[in-house]
Amino acid sequence: MFFCCFTKAPQICCSWCWICWIVCGLAFVQSSEESNLCIDIYDEVGIGGGASGMSGGLLHPYSPKVKLLWRGEECWKESLKLLNVAEDARSSKSLDMVMPKTGLKEGDFIVRRSGLVRPVLSVKNMHMMNDNAQNCIASCRIESIHKDAAQKLVPDLCVPLDLAFHMPEAVNVNPQNYLEALYLACKTFVKSKCSLGISCKELNLHKESVLNLLELAGDYDAVIVCLGSGAAFLPELSGRLPLRMCRGVIAHLQLPDHIREDYPENSPSILSDAWLAVQGPQTLYLGSTWEWKSRNFSRHVPQEEASKALAELLPKASAVYPAIKNWTVKGTCAGLRAMPPLTAEGSLPLLGCVDEFIGGPTECKYWLFTGLGSRGLFYHALLGKLMAQAVLSCNEDLIPSELTSWKHRVKQ
Ligand SMILES: *[C@@H]1O[C@H](CO)[C@@H](O)[C@H](O)[C@H]1NC(C)=O
Ligand SMILES: *[C@@H]1O[C@H](CO)[C@@H](O)[C@H](O)[C@H]1NC(C)=O
């Protein structure tokens, strides 16, 4: 059987579409007993769409706006499992190569396990966060803490209402490193199965772009479109997906060497009206802006857009972490999020078989995986697994109906 996944993702959430299909790939190679399985992945840039550090990578199962995220605990646990798979793949590789232990660059991690802290700035979302704290899942606790305790976590943190929420188990993921390691895990898995003679599978990455779905028609048993917002630009799907586009800019900040107050090694990253994703004692990412209705997926941020974004982000960062004034902006980059519609269960990604959109017979050939919005990291592992199962068994019913119901709404 031949499978193909493709993505093109020069964007913030971009890394997430890459994640989606790499996860599908992993699930494929691991779950299928079928002996001749070939997976071709198309991306014109390469792993992660060249989107290194394009996303904050803050992972936790809560939102300050809703009671509980859809399948919160399951999504959280599946994500942690895959992070471990990626870390194992990378550490066995580095054993092979006898990588030097010293001289690790800042940001050279897959997961930074230092938690997250959210100082309360207004009473608006306080009740929901309190509610989350009381009903939190055991593997990712939320503790409400006072100013003293919060400032022990992050010296100089502003806690104006003497209340902050601390998630000690929440993590920071470096998306590019994570993706590269997951891809390595897929490769290693395929190789080990082959050498044991159990089954021969193939996994190939093609640095090519795919301009329309029919291009792939003849060659594959199944095609999975993991294009993020790019799905809406495919001729076959254009104008037919209920996605709202939203451009986001994030900034890369560095602390100059002459400033002595480094960000402490084990201090949590910060969530607020803006997020601060700490990469190391002198490096962090600050995001993100929300420019609704933009259709511009260029990573490049022109001077004018950068100034506007910083004028919005820096005061928000400063309101919780005044020391940000001592940090220098090293650059900005941008991406286009594909935001799914709000349903009774929340804003859920769009999955499913899309043969009927292509106009061919309904034979479970073309599949869509999009609308991860700003929660790609949270949903990727569980949904990638479900997607792979559905595609392999040619059965859309294996995907929860909440994720495929968008198709009925579109048709009406
Ligand atoms: C999108 O952004 C790029 C880079 O900032 C810019 O060159 C281009 O003109 C923009 N395109 C549109 C349609 O606004
Ligand atoms: C900036 O750094 C200087 C020198 O290390 C320090 O004295 C000052 O308090 C810092 N500013 C803020 C706003 O934290």
Image (cartoon, grey):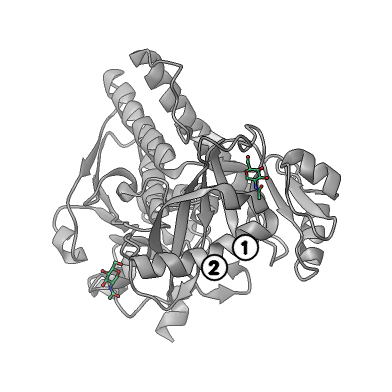
* Neighbour tally class for label 2: few under 14, some 14-19, many 20 plus, Cα within 10 Å: some
Location of the N terminus (image quadrant): top left
Given residues 218 and 70, the one toward you in this image is 70
Rendered position, 112 above or below 135 = above
Q: Position of residue 96 (x, y in %)?
A: 35, 14
* Residue that mark 2 sits on: 312
Location of the C terminus (image quadrant): bottom left
- Alpha-carbon span between mark 2 and mark 1: 7 Å
Q: Which residue occupies 65% across, 54% down? A: 271
Rendered position, 151 above or below 296 = above
Q: Position of residue 125 (x, y in %)?
A: 75, 67
Q: Position of residue 221 (x, y in %)?
A: 23, 53
* Residue that mark 1 sits on: 316
Rendered position, 162 above or below 175 = below
Q: How many marks?
A: 2
Kind of residue at badge 2 = Glu
Q: Quadrant of residue 273?
A: bottom right
265 horizontally vs 37: left or right: right
Q: Which residue occupies 85% across, 55% down? A: 162
Given residues 222 and 259, the one toward you in this image is 259
Q: Quadrant of ligand 2?
A: top right
